[in-house]
Image (cartoon, grey):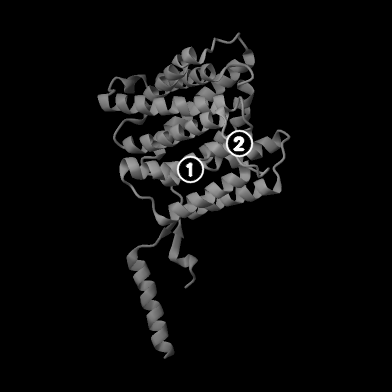
Amino acid sequence: MSFLSRYQFSVKPQEALLIVITMFWGGTFLAVQYAVTLSDPFFFVGLRFATAAMAVGLLSLRSLRGLTRLELKAGVMIGIAIAFGYSLQTWGLQSISSSKSAFITAMYVPLVPLLQWLCLGRMPGLMSCVGILLAFIGLVLLAGPDGNLLALGAGEIITLAGALAIAAEIILISAWAGKVDVRRVTVVQLATASLVAFTMMIPAGESVPSFSPGLLVVALGLGIFSAIIQVVMNWAQRSVSPTRATVIYTGEPVWAGIFGRMAGERLPVLALLGAAFIIAGVLVSELKFKKKKALAQVAQDAENKCTAQE
């Protein structure tokens, strides 16, 4: 029996949906890059998530009547993480290149299992760890084709802080998954993210930009998509571990590169190699050891074969 036959490959419907969401997620990079030329980061993020909150809220009016204290707490904490994650990442893009931003943001990949272990006491499995390692190597190759060492400036530090917030978001969603109503928590977290982002305009010295049809279209479009993302993430991570979800999310820069190529950008050979590593990481993370009983049967069959040969 071959080595691979000792493993089984399976993708849950929830995981498949996360993969699809990640594909579209990667396509939003060009839209955000365009938006920051029309608006400051905190205002844009606030408008984006205000739209998302209203979209989910209108579809969940009846459900909101049963909002519990636990759901309010969960939604507020997740919303704070979302606000800082998206705002800091958008802010950082104003002073650093997209490739450097992608690499630093990718730090949330190893941060998730670390925070998962520190905060929840859950050790990730062997194959999940291998998958994360492969995906992270791929992200380094994908985002750093010039091979230059990172010199941390203001933009890099801001983006790194955003990566930590994104990791915290994934952990918090998993911590309350299955304990709260998905729609109610989603409305609270999106509204909180919007409120926090708008509030941060004051210390950041931002002002409301002049009306722009382009900004409005991008904000509304990304707002609705953000609503879909949060609903799917909250639902799917009831049965998908934070570690496996994180590896799936690492496909985002791959899709961002594909959409960028469609817009006229070109991926160098090293970046294509990085994309291959990321895909390998996703696949490896989906490998599971078969049950001990099955492995015991394999060992017994091998022993019987050796005995017969003797």
Residue that numbered label 2 is attached to: 100
Q: Amino acid at mark 1?
A: Val
Q: Which mark is residue 109?
A: 1
Work out whether 289 lies above or below 224.
Answer: below
Q: Can you say which quadrant of the picture contains the C terminus?
A: bottom left
Q: Quadrant of residue 91?
A: top right
Q: Position of residue 150 (x, y in %)?
A: 60, 39
Q: Which mark is residue 282?
A: none
Work out whether 171 lies above or below 307.
Answer: above
Q: Position of residue 309 (x, y in %)?
A: 44, 89
**Does residue 302 show up?**
yes
Secondary structure of the residue carrying numbered label 1: helix
Residue in front for this viewpoint, 246 or 137: 137
Residue at image position (40%, 21%) is 192
Q: Earlier in the sequence, mark 2 or mark 1?
A: 2
Secondary structure of the residue carrying numbered label 2: helix
Work out whether 208 lies above or below 74.
Answer: above
Residue at image position (56%, 23%) is 221
Q: Amino acid at mark 2?
A: Lys
